[in-house]
């Protein structure tokens, strides 16, 4: 959609004014929402803007590069998207993604590159990507929410594998403790009363020892012992929202 008129009145403090003259021949949807004019693209953000530079003999290679960098910096707020930080359990530092819902992708190319490589070649420079790419790659958003979900899924899978190994080690440790032989007796000793031994306490969430694997030092970052959970589960539960804890374990008396 193009404006019907562009007005300027700097003497009145009006630098620019876009004017749309409505003859009531369009529906209100078309007048109010520009997206009705474009089919869905399957990508975040608005339709991309492409700048084709044709410096000719007016600029050398250095001059063209400077011009592209200037335009890229001046339009950064338009194409960069907004960063959304996400907390990930077990991560030492925060991870996140860029939201491009309100961003306009800006791409550069030159007439010389288009003539040499064609529009399907690696002739497109997407602002924010930092390299020459083909068209599908230049239109993609490799650091969006889908990429974060993929990374978070891999982290959760690694944590689950680690917990599985720890549970197996705890079971093996408990079984070894129950099967260990007693002290060696000589013929002169009289057998004393058998002292009952308490079975090792296992985490009610993952099944490993509540004290954690033998010899493991967790430091001050782990919540204090509660007698019911191992150090790994106590750390995990402390980072989950209270509503989720209640939904998973119910109210305890």
Image: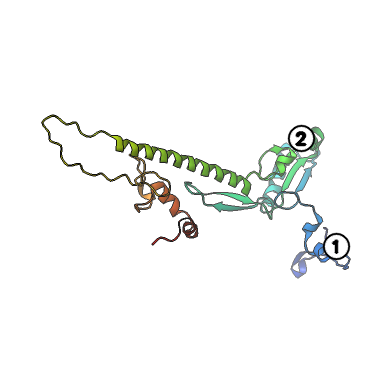
Q: Position of residue 211 (x, y in %)?
A: 34, 45
Name the N-terminal-most of marks 2 and 1: 1
- Residue 14's spot in the image, x, y percent? 76, 67
- Left or right: 136 as drawn, with respect to 163: right
How far separated are the C-alphas under marks 2 and 1?
37 Å
Q: Is residue 123 left or right of residue 153?
A: right
Question: Relative to the observer, which residue lies in front, 181 or 135?
Answer: 181
Camera-nearest residue between 62 and 22: 22
Q: Give the residue drawn at x 37%, y 52%.
A: 228
Report whether residue 30 is seen. Answer: yes
Q: Dots 2 and 1: beta carbons under 8 Å?
A: no
| Place of residue 244 in the rendered image (x, y in percent of width and height, measured from the top left) | 50, 57
Q: Determine the residue located farthest toward the top in the rendered image.
A: 187
Residue that badge 2 annotates: 121
107, above or below 187, in the image: below
Q: Residue at x 45, y 42 (%)?
A: 163
Q: Secondary structure at mark 2?
A: loop
Residue placed under numbered mark 1 in the picture: 4
In this rendered view, identify the residue nearer to me: 11 or 126: 126
Compared across the picture, whether 18 is left or right of 127 comes to: right
Q: Quadrant of the N terminus?
A: bottom right
């Amino acid at each position: 959609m193009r404006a019907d008129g562009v007005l300027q009145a700097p003497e009145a403090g009006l630098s620019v004014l876009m004017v749309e003259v409505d003859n009531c021949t369009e529906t209100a949807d078309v007048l109010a929402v520009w997206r009705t004019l474009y089919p869905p693209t399957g990508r975040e953000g608005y339709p991309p803007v492409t700048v084709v530079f044709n410096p000719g003999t007016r600029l050398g290679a250095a001059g063209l590069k400077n011009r592209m960098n200037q335009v890229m910096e001046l339009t950064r707020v338009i194409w960069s998207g907004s960063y959304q930080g996400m907390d990930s359990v077990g991560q030492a530092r925060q991870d996140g993604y860029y939201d491009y819902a309100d961003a306009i992708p800006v791409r550069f190319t030159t007439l010389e590159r288009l003539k040499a490589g064609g529009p399907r070649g690696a002739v497109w420079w997407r602002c924010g990507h930092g390299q020459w790419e083909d068209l599908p790659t230049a239109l993609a958003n490799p650091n969006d929410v889908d990429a974060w979900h993929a990374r978070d899924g891999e982290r959760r899978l690694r944590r689950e594998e680690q917990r599985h190994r720890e549970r197996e080690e705890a079971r093996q440790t408990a079984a070894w403790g129950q099967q260990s032989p007693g002290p060696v007796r000589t013929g002169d000793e009289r057998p004393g009363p058998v002292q009952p031994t308490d079975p090792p306490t296992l985490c009610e969430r993952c099944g490993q020892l509540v004290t954690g694997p033998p010899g493991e030092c967790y430091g001050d970052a782990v919540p204090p012992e509660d007698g019911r959970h191992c150090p790994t589960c106590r750390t995990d539960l402390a980072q989950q929202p209270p509503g989720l804890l209640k939904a998973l374990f119910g109210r305890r008396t």
